[in-house]
Amino acid sequence: MTNRENVLKALRREKPERIPFEFVLCPSKIEEFRNRTGETDYQEYYDFPIRYVELNPTMKKTDFSIYYKDLPENAEPLSWNPEWGVMSVKGTVAHFERMLHPMEDFTTVEEIRSYPFPDFNDEYRWEGFEEKVNQLKKNDLVAVAFMQMTIFEVAWYLRGMENLMIDMVCNPEMAEALLDEITKIRTGMAQKYARYGIDILMLGDDVSSQQDMIMDPGMWRKLLKPRLASVIAAAKSANPEILVFYHGDGNLQKIIPDLIEIGVDILNPVQPECMDPFLIKKLYGDKLSLWGTLGTQTTLPFGTPDEVKQKCRELIEAIGKDGGLLLAPTHTIEPEVPWENIQAFIDAVKEYGTFSI
């Protein structure tokens, strides 16, 4: 079974030959990887079976500074999502940033509708995209499109969290105008990603805290669920075989049935500090695959290498051996994680994650 076949089989909840895995390193850990190995690409070094396909860069030039009052001199476009016009100031800890919001002072729907939203759906952004996807498949890799921060998170990045939450309750016409503009963009992108052959479409919005959702589930079902459903429907109408991944940190157990209903195939990250991955597998494992499950707030940073290996073994045997798991840390691997624990994770996958078919 090829790497590509193995991953897709596992995520379609069929028995794989081996547990697929991946992880994301923060900048300081990437530097540590390079110093330890002399290599530059950790995805290639560890033979990750997935790769992300990006759009061509924008040619659009927009002066977003006009949407800010008293913009700090050290403000820069948000490093990992610059095209929406969100600015940031670097924090004092590692790679974290403080966001600034271009729509913070908006008072009318007209201001929202006239905002210079990104040109993600312009044809020049997609030139050569299908060829890149096909090349990955020829190289035995799974082609993934990253479209997390799908609707809600982009909305609060633009408007500010407090303003958006107030709008959702007190000024619904403002909230819905912004959510609709974002959904229109995301729906077009989802359709194109699917049409051009992406295997996995990564969606997601953080709508939960560690303990519970940050809004009433009824509010989520009214304002966010139908818009997310339209994005997923656009992708699956263009390619019914595409797998839809949904990222949501925290405890979102109350809306898992809703996510399944609208077409989510894979849930990420399933933080064990917030939800029991073994219970989630028991309740929804016939309809939903899990991507993640290894805690980055507990086991990975603070366990011993033996404890990391034992936890991986438990997850593989209980959740992954018959399909339905891509084992991964539940978040970016941050500076406090000992390299020995990262190696223990890799060793555990190799030692416990191979099955006879």
Image (cartoon, rainbow, N blue to C red):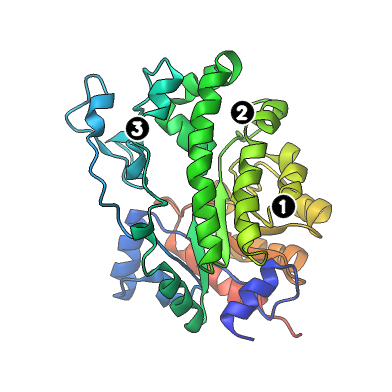
Inter-mark Cα distance, 2 to 1: 21 Å
> Please, what is the three-letter code of the amino acid marked with disc 1?
Pro
Q: How crowded is mark 1: few (under 14 residues within 10 Å), some or many (20 or more)?
A: many
Contact between marks 3 and 1 (CB within 8 A): the answer is no
Residue 277 marker: 1
The residue that mark 2 highlights is 214
- Give the residue displayed 36% in from the left and 66% down from the top: 127
Q: How many labels does the image show?
A: 3
Label 2 or label 1, whichever comes before in sequence order: 2
Residue 90 in sight? no
Q: In this view, does 23 lie above or below 189?
A: below
User: Looking at the picture, how far across and down is residue 154, in whole percent?
Assistant: 46, 37
Contact between marks 2 and 1 (CB within 8 A): the answer is no
Of helix, strand and loop, which one carries label 3?
strand
Which is more toward the observer, 292 or 195?
A: 195
Q: Is residue 356 above or below residue 290?
A: below
Of helix, strand and loop, which one carries label 1?
helix
- Give the residue displayed 36% in from the left and 27% down from the top: 101
> Please, what is the three-letter code of the amino acid marked with disc 2?
Ile
Image quadrant assignment for residue 13: bottom right
